Structures are given as C-alpha cells and as structure tokens.
Image (cartoon, rainbow, N blue to C red):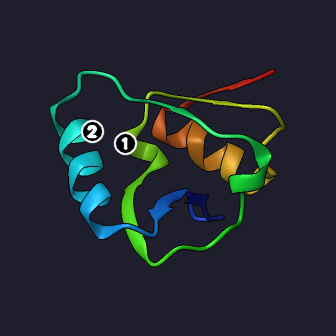
Amino acid sequence: SALDEDGDLLDFDAQEVVVSKAIIRQSRSAFLVADHSKFQRNAPVRIASLKDISTIFTDRPLSDDLTSKCRDWGTTIQTE
C-alpha cells in the first residue's frame, strides 16, 4: 500500500501484513513491484524494509536518499 522515505513497506491490513512477513522471511529472494503512487504514502502497519527486498521494479526513480539507502542495502532498483 505504501513505501515511505525510510524505505519501509507499509499496509493497512494487519492480517495481510502477517502473511507478507512470512512470505518475505521464507523467501530466498523477494521482489517488489510498486508504481510511483506508493512513494511517500503512509499506512499504519510495517511489513518490512527495502533492505529485505532483492529488487524493486518501479515506473519512476526513487528519491536520491532512498536510492542511496538501497545501494547500501544491496537492493537493486529497476526503473521502466
């Protein structure tokens, strides 16, 4: 539902978050597909961080700060 400037993945549904966390925890690689409308949105429940994601696929570049964080975390950004 949302991706904040700290790189946190957020959602509104706590039950879905439990499932999402389990999937990420059990995965060898995790991929995120998010369009720009998710950037800097807010939602009450944290799923994970982009540092837990292997690659994010998005339609617009992330902010310079978030791009730098992804580089430090080893998270690849694919912009189309």
**Mark number, residue 24:** 2
Compare residues 64 and 26 and report the one nearer the observer: 26
**Label 1: few (<14), some (14–19) or many (≥20) C-alpha neighbours in 10 Å:** some
The quarter of the displayed image where residue 38 is located: bottom right
Q: Residue at x 15, y 32 (%)?
A: 26
- In the rendering, at what x and y percent does residue 29 appear? 33, 23
The answer to the question of whether label 1 and label 2 lie on touching residues, with beta carbons closer than 8 A, is yes
Residue 78 % position (x, y): 69, 23
Q: Vertically, is 5 above or below 63?
A: below
Tell me the amino acid under the disc marked 1: Asp
Q: Going by the picture, which residue comes out furthest to the bottom?
A: 44
Q: Please state if 12 lies on the left or on the right of 1 as rendered.
A: left
Neighbor class of circle 2 (other Cα within 10 Å; few <14, some 14-19, many 20+) is: some
Please tell me whether mark 1 sits on a helix, a strand or a loop: helix
Where residue 50 sits: x, y (%)?
48, 46
Residue 52: mark? 1
Q: Determine which of the numbered discs, if any, sits on residue 78 in the image.
A: none
Residue at (66% x, 64% y) in the render: 5
Q: Residue at x 23, y 37 (%)?
A: 23
Relative to 69, does residue 35 appear above or below in the rendering? Answer: above
Earlier-in-chain disc, 1 versus 2: 2
Tell me the quarter of the picture where residue 3 sits.
bottom right
- Name the quadrant of the C terminus: top right
Of 72 and 40, the residue lying toward us: 40
Q: Relative to 38, is 33 on the left or the right?
A: left
